[in-house]
Image (cartoon, coloured by chain):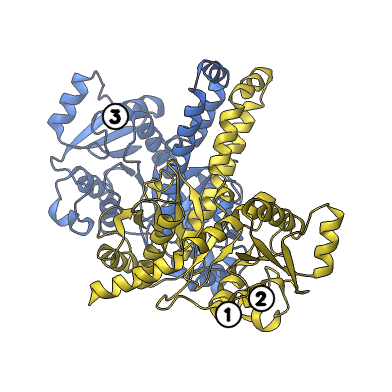
Chain colours: A blue, B yellow
Amino acid sequence: MKIIVDAFGGDNAPLEVLKGCAMAVQEYHLTVVLTGDEEIIKKTAEENGVTLTGMEIVHAPDVVMVEDDPAAVIKNHGDSSLVKGLSLLAQGEGDAFVSAGSTGALVVGSSLLVKRIKGIKRAALAPIIPSNTGCYMLMDAGANLECRPEMLLQFGIMGSAYMNKIVKVNSPRVGLLNVGAEETKGTVLQKEAFALLKSAPVNFTGNIEPRDVPMGDCEVVVCDGFSGNIVLKLTEGLASAMMGNIKNILYKNTLTKLAAASIKGGLMELKKKMDYTEHGGAPLMGIAKPVIKAHGSSNANAFKNAIRQARDFVEHDVIGEIERSLEELKRTAQ
Amino acid sequence: MKIIVDAFGGDNAPLEVLKGCAMAVQEYHLTVVLTGDEEIIKKTAEENGVTLTGMEIVHAPDVVMVEDDPAAVIKNHGDSSLVKGLSLLAQGEGDAFVSAGSTGALVVGSSLLVKRIKGIKRAALAPIIPSNTGCYMLMDAGANLECRPEMLLQFGIMGSAYMNKIVKVNSPRVGLLNVGAEETKGTVLQKEAFALLKSAPVNFTGNIEPRDVPMGDCEVVVCDGFSGNIVLKLTEGLASAMMGNIKNILYKNTLTKLAAASIKGGLMELKKKMDYTEHGGAPLMGIAKPVIKAHGSSNANAFKNAIRQARDFVEHDVIGEIERSLEELKRTAQ
């Protein structure tokens, strides 16, 4: 299997990308195709003792910046590591693409170059977020700030396929993020999406209130991208604020520092449990081939996990499963 | 001063309401007007040794349930503790109203019976939520699921007045909840609200990303009610999930239990810091007289705090301040 990796995406590129790729090649026995400035890649690898064994490099000297207008990236940055990676994927020169670059450019570029699965209206950014009982896929987390009900229906179907195939959840519970549990709650969007999801070929458990999301009441949380972005970023911010508070308590004085020593193991476990990079990155669900958006601040381990996730995505044929579900939806609607 | 209190609102009514009122009467030297079934109030007080000194009772035998359609409550439940309380406030039989009853009924009932401040388009449910550095007013937290830009502008003005007058924040920072910091981010609603807030008589600090909200980067967080409801409920859920996790770590074995003993003080402080009932309830900002929505699960202490908050609201003339700000806005717009 060949995984294409954007060597110049994210805050820690290219070094952490290269380290992560080296780990992935060794652990998962796959080939990595790196896109980016060949000279810098080779120099960085050499200077830091990272082996490039099992990796090919496709030269792409340009880099897409977060400030760049996503809509113009393909036209203006055809020679960038991001656009080159997507082009290679579209041409079949690899099985999946991983990038920690600009989310906007990745969403627009994927939709235009790699295209969407037939029948899918819009691709969703779908991070997997830890919960008290496991994890859930949040979709959409920001690719589509405004959504139509049919899009939320498709998000539910796609999320269900992913959680079933990759995370091995049997009959994943799909919840519609809403301000109340009753069917009549929410705006027109939620009411119409509720009706559509109710008769979809997924295990729709109704509305889920935001307070039940971190408890793990659903494995797929469906919402518009504006709401999903709030869930994603508030979860990050609150977890970090809480951990900071706990740290302050533990480092208050000698006595609390002693206490800290004996619960350190538990806290480290909790930190690991809450670390969403353990699950890899956020797949762009709905694109015709696997595209994984790694977190902008990804370190080597996060890149390794995102590559593993890309491999699983290919191996378990998530896209085929989505296509079958869409077929089933069509049949039942007839 | 006379604070009208709905004796039959919330999960712990009427006992915890009565206890909270008794504490408030004693501490704040004010008069409480209780609305509700007179017989039950007297019986509950007697059986539990709660004194009703300093309280008047206005008999209202009916109770509004959370399931009741808010739009029909005034018509169908005129004899309820909630509607009776609002009527008394409208008639000037008290200075403020506190209820832990149905949010929807309280918002609709207040707008219809007590009316809105002249020029205010919609009332907002505005809880005060603890942050790492203090607290912030979140508005709207669910009264208006869909908003127009002018509403968000008014939310910013009203929240600023409250945080300045009641929480004593000098020049409160007003932030617009959005998916990114740049002015161009968000949907049409955020873009237009940004432009309006920029020239409003408040300390508008631009967009605030959800991850910075719990850090305390703003004292007023402005958003539509759907988004605000997510922030409110996800904050509750995550804090509770995190505290549960920490508890599990601390009660794992004898060693960790010993550790727990020495950091117990710090954790209790943190719990108190995160307890939003310490700030009282959520004011309905925009109503022509002070109306406080206490949390449905309020205990006696939360009711006491909500009554103190109502008193402060009256004493510091928050509504007058809002009216002056609206005047200023009008002047600068001319």
* Residue matched to label 3: A16
- Contact between marks 2 and 1 (CB within 8 A): the answer is yes
Q: In terms of depth relative to the viewer, which is nearer, B47 or A226?
A: B47
Q: Earlier in the sequence, mark 2 or mark 1?
A: 2
Find numbered disc 3 in the image and state the secondary structure of the residue it sits on: helix
Q: Position of residue A132 (x, y in %)?
A: 58, 41
Q: Position of residue B280 (x, y in %)?
A: 57, 54
- Contact between marks 3 and 2 (CB within 8 A): the answer is no
Q: Which mark is residue B83?
A: 2
The residue under label 3 is which amino acid type? Glu
* Residue matched to label 1: B113
Residue extending furthest bottom? Answer: B75
Find numbered disc 1 in the image and state the secondary structure of the residue it sits on: helix
The residue under label 1 is which amino acid type? Leu
Residue plotted at (64% across, 31% down): B248
Question: Compared to B334, does A183 lie above or below?
Answer: above
